[in-house]
Amino acid sequence: MQNKPKKHILIIDDDEEIIELLTDFFEGNGFSVGTASNGLEGLDYFNRRLPDLVISDLLMPGEHGLNVVKTIKEKYFIPVIMISSIYKEGQLKNIMEEHFIEAFFEKPLHLDVLLEKVNSILNARPV
């Protein structure tokens, strides 16, 4: 019996503590994780290794998270979850629909709810 490859998540955030928290959490829950500390680095990583899902902050230096999402979604059908401590979900409803963002979470993050959403998205995608 073959082991299924781990689903790969790319985390893009300029807050090193968030990156560390999410990396440890998702690796502890059976995922492989790649990280980037800003939008440009995230796009570079994305172009080298396609993840199964992206979790990205919105407000980052260099490249705004929405620009990262637009670039990703123009080329690929990769699910994206946006996170932010500045923006609120109500402010982003139209933007989320327009750019096909799968979910939005306000910081501080509720990790169990985030994990449930990630599993729901990834299990619904065809293999």
Image (cartoon, rainbow, N blue to C red):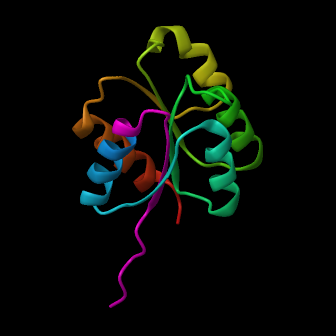
Query: Residue 72: percent from the left, percent from the top?
Result: 69, 43
Task: State the image quarter where residue 73 is shown.
Answer: top right
For image coordinates 61% across by 29% down, the residue present is: 65
- In the image, the segment drawn in magenta is 1-18
Of all residues, the one furthest to the right in this rendering is: 74
For image coordinates 67% across by 23% down, the residue present is: 98
Q: Tell me if residue 119 comes above or below residue 55 in the rendering.
A: below
Number of marks = 0
- Looking at the image, residue 116 sits to the left or right of residue 106; the answer is left
Q: In this view of the protein, which residue sits in the foreground, 38 or 104?
A: 38
- Picture quarter with the N terminus: bottom left
For image coordinates 57% across by 27% down, the residue present is: 60
Query: Residue 116: percent from the left, percent from the top?
Result: 29, 43
Q: Tell me if residue 42 comes above or below residue 96 in the rendering.
A: below
- Looking at the image, residue 122 sits to the left or right of residue 64; the answer is left
Of all residues, the one furthest to the bottom in this rendering is: 1
For image coordinates 45% across by 15% down, the residue present is: 89
Q: In this view of the protein, which residue sits in the foreground, 101 or 34?
A: 34
Query: Residue 122: percent from the left, percent from the top?
Result: 44, 53
- Looking at the image, residue 106 sits to the left or right of residue 81; the answer is left
Q: Tell me if residue 102 comes above or below residue 72 in the rendering.
A: above
Q: Tell me if residue 1 comes above or below residue 3 in the rendering.
A: below
Q: Is residue 15 magenta?
A: yes
Q: Is residue 60 magenta?
A: no
Query: Residue 27: percent from the left, percent from the top?
Result: 31, 59
